[in-house]
Image: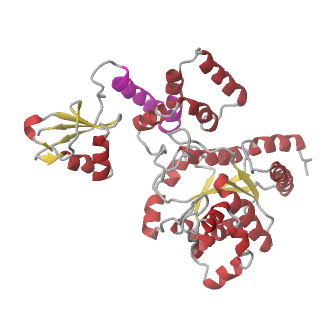
Amino acid sequence: MEAINEQAIDEQVEVLMSGAAYGDPQTRENMKKELRARLIEAEKEGRPLRVYCGFDPRTSDLHLGHTIPIRKLRQFQDYGHDVTFLIGTFTSLIGDPSDKEKARDQLTAEQVDKNARTYEEQAFKILDPEKTRVRRNDEWLSPLDFADIIRLASNFTVQQFLVRENFAKRVDANQPIYLHEFFYALMQAYDAVAQETDVQVGGQDQLFNILVAGRKLQTGLGQKPQIAVIMGESLPGTDGSAKMSKSMGNHIPLLSEPWDMFGKVMNIPDEAMTIYNKLILGWQQNKLEDFDKALASGELHPNEAKMALAREIVTIFHGEAGSAAAQKRWDETFRSGGDGIPEDIPEKVLSETKRLIDILRDNDMVRSGKEAKKLAENNGIRVNGEKVSDVGMEINADILPVVVQVGKRKFLRLKAN
């Protein structure tokens, strides 16, 4: 048997643990030591580490914030480890209570399945599809019966769950904690057992589920406890402060059109550019410091820096052609000095008189009448460049063609037959 190259192992540990944080330096050191030992053990056995990260399809799209743990999976993949992209088709039915101050709404199996259909395609924007195992956790969670649940639950105490910060807050506020919410960590822990996981990757909100529940259940069932790689920083949303989240409405979906993704990146505050360069583009500390100095000195203009960031992000998910088209549309709208209407906007034939609010809803320019009214109140809707205050106005063939605009990036040209 060939000797273990411990220097190569140490280099691998440094890369794989980069960006990991646990709120406690000793825990990080323990995980680092365990990862090193597991890598040596796996090399002696001639096998890769079994690594996974789970994503619950509570909605139909992943967003830029999700790509941080996915990039960590890619690092493991590049070192030749066995990577699983796990879709939480069963855990989604409950919803993770982590970091939540009230119970999530429960989804139906049909809703979850519909949401999950594009997750592989989105993950493969970063992961190598030839080297990625994709699984759904209903595969092993659905067959469990009540006796199995009792057996698994006997490994935990209620006190272990109540010390979780979000549950403790609810107790202090006299807010309900539903029994089914305890099951989430139990189910995620069983994900690790079912896959005999060596390493699980996750965000800060998964610290309890991975580091406590997962490791404890594996130990209780005779497996070696997984190493937790908990990513230390979260990507802020388009507001630049709160963590990117669909429920907050500050997210940038991976499925967004190139021009929409470009525009959303352009809307982030200047001060958020550094962390986007770090977490999404993978810039190292020296490059980030040079970037900050150039901004502070005026050598680099914030708008040009942000456009470069937007181009690179769009290129990752839509290729160079998508990025170039998005840049062109941005220039036509905001930099050309013209009427601000891009050339390539969608067109629809209007064959009958319709209310503006119905046109907006029918073409997915707003999600609801309430949103349309609020946008109009804030001067966010225009028809032929003129602000519209009454979304109930009628549009008929006599005034066609017209261009309807919602916000800065949504356009629709209505024309006659």
Closer-to-camera residue (271/246) = 271
Q: Residue 137, how many percent across, how many down?
A: 59, 66
Location of the C terminus (image quadrant): top left
* 106 lies left or right of 66: left
Magenta part, dominant SS: helix
Q: Residue 30, how many percent across, how many down?
A: 84, 53
Colour treatment of the image: secondary structure
* 245 lies left or right of 340: right
Q: Residue 407, how many percent across, how many down?
A: 34, 37
Can residue 76 be seen here?
Answer: yes
Q: Is residue 222 positioned above or below 370 on the image?
A: below
Q: Quadrant of residue 336?
A: top left
Q: Report if residue 316 lies within the magenta region.
A: yes
Q: Is residue 137 positioned above or below 202 on the image?
A: below
Image point (46%, 64%), residue name: 113
Closer-to-camera residue (108/315) = 108
Q: Is residue 241 positioned above or below 135 on the image?
A: above
Q: Quadrant of residue 325?
A: top left
The stretch in magenta equals: 311-335
Q: Report if residue 59 lies within the magenta region.
A: no
